[in-house]
Image: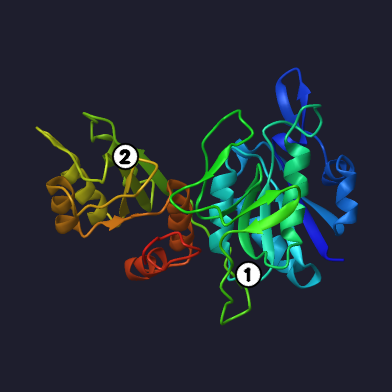
């Protein structure tokens, strides 16, 4: 029987109602006790990493999860991380960069309703997470939710209330779980190097700037002193608008001159950015040699930027880390 370590972080799945709203109160052992069927699947040990609403989670907590996995890696066959749904896609992306090439599964799950209430998705999601964690083909960082198994770099929360809260963006679900059995659609390719790579370094001095029509670019003058990287979430395939007397392109040039990394992304959830298509994109790319997220999800783009900043000492090293594909985050590369 396999040994699985469950790491609890709080979230809706572990919440109870209070006069101030739902608050994480249940322990990891409380969660396991609510799902007695798990005892037939594997040996389970538990650890409390933190006890937070996922809105309060930061890269510091995700690095702590990665380090906990690293410290316990030899003793267990897999890991299940119970996490709140609101930032779970960021957590899945972050762990995908901090724990690479893992032959053992690191499975994130949670729920839209607490395990404490009667009509909840928590029990099924917990069972499915352990079913996947004990599957002989399971590996790497995965998000398991509502019967879907999604790569950590491709997951996004797309619904605030429904049980089918997560989608795999521009990439197929790698498996589904039906009647507590794993049906694999995409089987993992064996790694030439079977050893996992851990690197829990993050620099969270990253800002996401979402463009709106007519944006006053004066805000960018503030950013140069308070960040190391700005991800500009543009319109459509991407580009920098040049409103009369209000040039975003000039402001971006000042950021770059101040040593800030500028990365172009798109507000559109599917199919990615491509600065080469329109003149507004070509002009910006040619003038400043801008980085571009391409087919990466927003969550992966943000977390990879933080991770690459934390692991680089030069713009050249940052570019190398940013553009090295990890778990299909850059499709077509």
Which image quarter holds the C terminus? bottom left
Disc 1 packing (10 Å; few <14; some 14–19; many ≥20) = many
The residues tagged by marks 1 and 2 sit, at their Cα atoms, a distance apart of 40 Å
The number of numbered discs placed on residues in the rendered structure image is 2
The residue at the point 90 percent across, 55 percent down is 40
Residue 238 picture location, percent across and down: 25, 46
Q: Is residue 181 rendered to the left or right of residue 227?
A: right
Q: Where, by quadrant of the figure, is residue 181 drawn? A: bottom right
Q: Is residue 60 rendered to the left or right of residue 218?
A: right
Sequence-wise, the earlier of marks 1 and 2 is: 1
Q: Is residue 189 rendered to the left or right of residue 112?
A: left
Specify the farthest residue to the bottom: 192
Residue 248 marker: none
Helix, strand or loop at mark 2: helix
The residue at the point 86 percent across, 59 percent down is 42
Specify the farthest residue to the top: 19
Q: Which residue is mark 1?
A: 102
Disc 2 packing (10 Å; few <14; some 14–19; many ≥20) = few
| Residue 102 in view here | yes
Q: Nearer the viewer, residue 104 or 283?
A: 104
Q: Where, by quadrant of the figure, is residue 332 drawn? A: bottom left
The residue at the point 58 percent across, 37 percent down is 165
Which image quarter holds the N terminus? bottom right
| Residue 49 in view here | no
Q: Nearer the viewer, residue 103 or 50?
A: 103
Residue 108 picture location, percent across and down: 66, 51
The residue at the point 21 percent across, 45 percent down is 239
Q: Which residue is mark 2?
A: 222
Q: Answer above or below: position of 83 versus 199.
A: above
Helix, strand or loop at mark 1: loop
Q: Is residue 34 rendered to the left or right of residue 126?
A: right
């Amino acid at each position: 029987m396999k040994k699985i370590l469950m790491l609890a972080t709080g979230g809706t799945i572990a919440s109870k109602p209070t006069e101030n709203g739902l608050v994480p109160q249940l322990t990891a052992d409380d969660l396991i006790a609510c799902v007695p069927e798990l005892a037939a699947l594997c040996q389970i040990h538990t650890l409390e990493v933190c006890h937070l609403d996922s809105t309060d989670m930061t890269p510091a907590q995700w690095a702590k999860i990665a380090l906990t996995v690293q410290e316990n890696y030899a003793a267990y066959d897999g890991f299940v991380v119970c996490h709140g749904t609101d930032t779970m896609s960021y957590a899945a992306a972050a762990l995908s960069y901090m724990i690479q090439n893992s032959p053992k599964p690191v499975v994130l799950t949670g729920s839209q309703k607490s395990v404490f209430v009667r009509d909840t998705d928590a029990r099924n999601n917990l069972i499915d997470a352990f079913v996947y964690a004990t599957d002989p083909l399971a590996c790497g960082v995965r998000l398991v939710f509502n019967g879907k198994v999604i790569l950590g770099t491709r997951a996004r929360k797309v619904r605030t209330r429904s049980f089918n809260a997560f989608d795999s963006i521009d990439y197929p679900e790698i498996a589904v779980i039906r009647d507590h059995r794993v049906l694999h659609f995409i089987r993992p390719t064996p790694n030439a190097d079977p050893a996992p790579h851990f690197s829990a370094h993050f620099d969270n001095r990253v800002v996401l700037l979402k463009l709106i029509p007519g944006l006053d670019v004066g805000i960018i003058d503030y950013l140069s002193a308070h960040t190391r990287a700005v991800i500009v979430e543009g319109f459509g395939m991407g580009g920098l608008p040049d409103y009369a007397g209000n040039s975003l392109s000039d402001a971006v040039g000042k950021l770059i001159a101040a040593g800030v990394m500028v990365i172009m992304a798109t507000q559109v959830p599917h199919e990615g950015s491509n600065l080469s298509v329109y003149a507004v994109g070509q002009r910006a790319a040619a003038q400043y040699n801008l980085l571009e997220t391409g087919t990466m999800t927003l969550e992966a783009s943000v977390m990879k930027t933080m991770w690459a900043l934390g692991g680089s000492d030069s713009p050249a090293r940052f570019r190398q880390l940013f553009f090295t594909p990890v778990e299909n985050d850059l499709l077509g590369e």
